[in-house]
């Protein structure tokens, strides 16, 4: 075998060992730098992929960031900051989760005030549209916004909140790139580039603050955890973890962009935060598998020790 062939074989072996399913001995030798190399090798297998990863071990304080400061369209991950702001308003006594809200499908662009309505065919939750014209509890809207990623519920809540305040509060948690400017499907705003944005590092900081109880009262924190744990879409981070693992998370998706931001609760140890943001991957299944594999690598590092 030529020197070049031997080198190619060694590289191929290294890639195989770097992926989920590596031998126990290889897994036991993991350290942050090896974790980084394994994740980068896995990302490199997807042509054109842009990926931001952030991992925060909330017990030992270890952190790993791979392009974690890269800014992405937030897609539906922006619903976590909205949820936090809502519960802070509840804690302040300005809103109540049991307060009824007239549900309408009529909104105004932040650019020019032009009216727009959401298309039920573009929303992941048709159940909310069935209640347009009714008074519904804020609690129910908050749950549907997270568990089924309802855009209509999101816009209804943003209409009674303050996006500027949300952005400012997220910055106080260390989320320096996160901007919550508007609701969903504001066409003129999208055309003008006025989009909700975030980064993996930002979402990790936001979820870490939530888990540590720094973002809201204990009761409100527990409510948010429970809602995030009831997430209906589980083909990304949860798919890479052992069956039955507790995960509180929020996904996001737009064209060629897929995200997942999670708090993972291994048994017998402190939780860790994992955020994977992707773009440039047209095939959703490819993006889901990539995120699940990154979750498996993170679990081998933190979930088993």
Image (cartoon, rainbow, N blue to C red):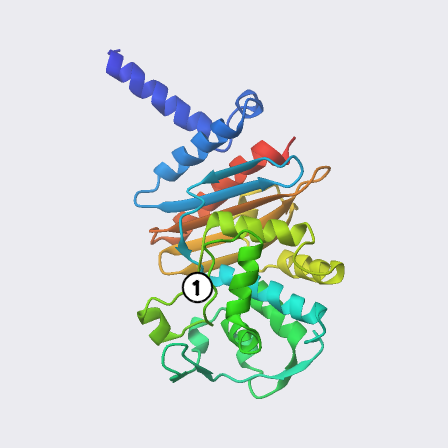
User: Which residue lies at the image location 43% right of the left edge and 54% below the top edge?
Assistant: 258
Q: Taking 284 as reference, is 26 above or below it?
A: above
Residue on which disc 1 sits:
196
- In this rendering, would 274 be left or right of 41? right
**In the rendered image, which quarter is residue 141 located in?**
bottom right
Q: Taking 304 as reference, is 166 above or below it?
A: below
- The quadrant of the picture occupied by the N terminus is top left
Q: How many marks?
A: 1
Where is residue 166? Give x, y as percent: 55, 65
- In this rendering, would 300 be left or right of 41? right
Where is residue 57? Give x, y as percent: 61, 39
Question: Which residue sits furthest bottom?
Answer: 133
User: Which residue lies at the image location 36% right of the left edge and 72% below the top edge?
Assistant: 189
Where is residue 100? Give x, y as percent: 67, 82
Question: Which residue sits furthest right?
Answer: 219
Packing grade of label 1 (10 A; few <14, some 14-19, many >=20) is: many
- The quadrant of the picture occupied by the C terminus is top right
Asked which secondary structure carries label 1, the reply is loop
User: Which residue lies at the image location 55% right of the left edge and 77% below the top edge?
Assistant: 156
């Amino acid at each position: 075998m030529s020197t070049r062939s031997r080198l190619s074989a060694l590289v191929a072996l290294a890639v195989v060992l770097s992926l989920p399913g590596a031998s126990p001995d290889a897994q036991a030798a993991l350290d942050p730098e090896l974790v980084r190399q394994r994740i980068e090798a896995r990302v490199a297998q997807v042509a054109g992929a842009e990926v931001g990863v952030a991992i925060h071990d909330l017990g030992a304080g270890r952190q790993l960031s791979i392009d974690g400061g890269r800014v992405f369209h937030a897609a539906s991950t922006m619903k976590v900051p909205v949820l936090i702001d809502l519960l802070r308003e509840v804690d302040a006594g300005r809103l109540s989760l049991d307060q009824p809200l007239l549900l309408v499908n009529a909104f105004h662009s932040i650019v020019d005030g032009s009216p727009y309505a959401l298309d039920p065919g573009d929303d992941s939750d048709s159940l909310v549209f069935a209640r347009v014209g009714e008074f519904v509890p804020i609690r129910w809207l908050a749950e549907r916004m997270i568990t089924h990623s309802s855009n209509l519920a999101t816009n209804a809540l943003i209409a009674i909140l303050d996006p500027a305040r949300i952005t400012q509060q997220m910055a106080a948690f260390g989320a320096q790139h996160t901007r919550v400017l508007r609701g969903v499907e504001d066409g003129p705003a999208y055309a003008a580039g006025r989009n909700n944005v975030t980064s993996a590092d930002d979402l990790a900081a936001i979820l870490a603050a939530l888990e540590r109880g720094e973002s809201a009262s204990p009761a409100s924190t527990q409510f948010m955890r429970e809602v995030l744990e009831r997430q209906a879409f589980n083909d990304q981070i949860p798919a890479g973890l052992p069956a039955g693992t507790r995960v509180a998370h929020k996904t996001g998706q737009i064209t060629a962009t897929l995200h997942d931001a999670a708090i993972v609760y291994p048994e017998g140890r402190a939780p860790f935060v994992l955020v994977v943001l992707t773009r440039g991957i047209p095939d959703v299944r490819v993006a889901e598998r990539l995120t699940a594999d990154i979750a498996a690598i993170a679990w081998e590092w933190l979930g088993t020790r």
